[in-house]
Amino acid sequence: MMNRTGPETIDMERRKALKTGGGIGLMALFGALGLLQPGKAFAEWNKTAFSSKTMDEALAALGVSAPANSDAIKLTVPEIAENGSVVPVTVVSNMPNVEQISILVDKNPNVLAANFTFPQGTEGMVTTRVKMGQTANVVALIKADGKFYRVAKEVKVTAGGCGG
Amino acid sequence: MGNPMKIRAAVKDGVTEVKVLMQHEMETGLRKEADGTLVPAWFITEVKAQHQGRTVLEAQYGQSISKNPYLLFRFKGGAVGEKVTVSWTDNKGDTRTDEAAITA
């Protein structure tokens, strides 16, 4: 008899262990999806900001309030983009201690395109390429010395970049 | 695993310029197939660049970044022969890491 019940008991233990394990797995998944927003680990994908539909929402999600316009930022974009699916964007800031550059397109379904974080020793510049669904403003947001600055330029799109 | 990136890193006057071309579809999740079904979102969410083990750039991407993302940035330091490593992660959890030696 002992021989029979033995394995059964072990099986029950295993089942329990599996259940607990599953629970932990689920927690990890939520964490990965950003549903459990903890104290904000550095470089965790900012789901709220990236799913923002309007400029105001995106700015709020990025923790930006009233960014100042600045001449020390150079935003280079084409005046007219024949192909909206590949629009080159270059942001160069001559400010010291640039910590972050965000690039936004105000009329895209999701306005935030990218968010770059610069450790000490990395220059405050970046070049990337964005998709644009229609003629819109490309906005560069820069965080330098804890303050936010903003510069915007309009790009006329003759063919949209949504796979059409 | 994803497809390999092209990475060029060149040092000039004490500043290393890094150019990266990633290979990725960067699907927005808004595009439809001819039959009207939505193509699910599939895009790079995070990019990290390191020089000799030190992080020199971190980026988060959204759906608005173009297919096969291009990236250019510069950091102080770097010597010929040293390594620059770039990694990305996409929204499906796929990752890819490539490295290149710094040239003059």
Image: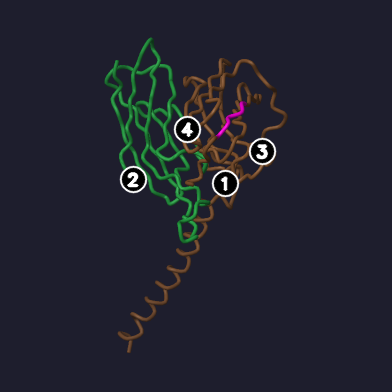
Chain colours: A brown, B green
In this view of the protein, which residue sits in the foreground, B68 or A62? B68
Q: What element carries label 1?
A: helix
- Kindly give the residue lying farthest to the left in the view shown: B81
Q: How crowded is mark 4: few (under 14 residues within 10 Å), some or many (20 or more)?
A: many
Q: Is mark 4 on a helix, strand or loop?
A: strand
Find disc 1 in the rendering and name its residue: A47
Image x and y of residue A37, in percent: 60, 48
Q: Residues within 10 Å of mark 2 (few under 14, many from 20)?
A: some
What is the CA distance from the residue labelled 2 to the residue labelled 4? 20 Å
The magenta segment: A153-157
- Horizontal placement of A65 versus A5: left or right? right
Find disc 2 in the rendering and name its residue: B2
Contact check, label 2 and label 4, Cβ < 8 Å: no
Q: Mark 1 lies on which chain?
A: A
B102 is within the stretch colored magenta:
no
Find disc 4 in the rendering and name its residue: A129
Q: Is mark 3 on a helix, strand or loop?
A: helix
The amino acid beneath tag 4 is: Arg
Image x and y of residue B74, in percent: 43, 21
Find disc 3 in the rendering and name its residue: A55
What is the CA distance from the residue labelled 3 to the residue labelled 4? 19 Å
Q: Residues within 10 Å of mark 3 (few under 14, many from 20)?
A: some
What is the CA distance from the residue labelled 1 to the residue labelled 3? 15 Å
The nearer-to-camera label among 3 and 2 is: 3
